[in-house]
Amino acid sequence: MSLQLVQDGDSFFSVVQQSAEPVVVGFFGDFSATSKNARPAFEQFCEEHPDRSAYLVDVSETRNVHTQLGVSSVPTVLLVKGDMVLRKVMGA
């Protein structure tokens, strides 16, 4: 599955909770230079691993997703299974 932009938190959480495999979720924001610089690397990682479901969250556009998953800074990448965060990487 290719990288998908999250535009609706409710739909996103429904898909994640039904997924049999963990999903990769990247949180970015255009207001942060570090986040802007890290986003292309995340997108490249997703292209190189098409077997993994991946989602991109622009925290300026989709506010409820990052707060529900405990993300307080960008860039942050999570590995999520159901409603559990398995791994969390913050910073660039």
Image (cartoon, rainbow, N blue to C red):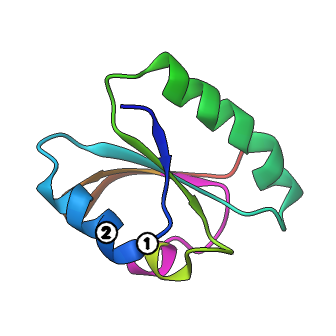
- Look at the image and give the residue range highlighted in magenta: 66-77
Q: How many marks?
A: 2
Q: Inspect the magenta stretch and tell me whether residue 78 lies in it.
A: no
Q: Would residue 2 appear left or right of 58 to someone viewing this image?
A: left
The label number, if any, that marks residue 91 in the structure image: none
The residue tagged with tag 1: helix, strand or loop? loop
Label 2 near label 1: C-beta < 8 Å?
Answer: yes
Q: Would residue 74 appear left or right of 88 to someone viewing this image?
A: right
Q: Amino acid at mark 2?
A: Ser
Work out whether residue 88 can be spotted: yes
Question: Mark 2 = which residue?
Answer: 11
Q: Who's the residue at 74% across and 42% down the image?
A: 38
Question: Mark 1 = which residue?
Answer: 8
Q: Residues within 10 Å of mark 1 (few under 14, many from 20)?
A: some
Percent position of residue 11, x then y: 31, 69
Percent position of residue 73, x then y: 65, 68
Q: CA distance from mark 1 to mark 2?
A: 6 Å
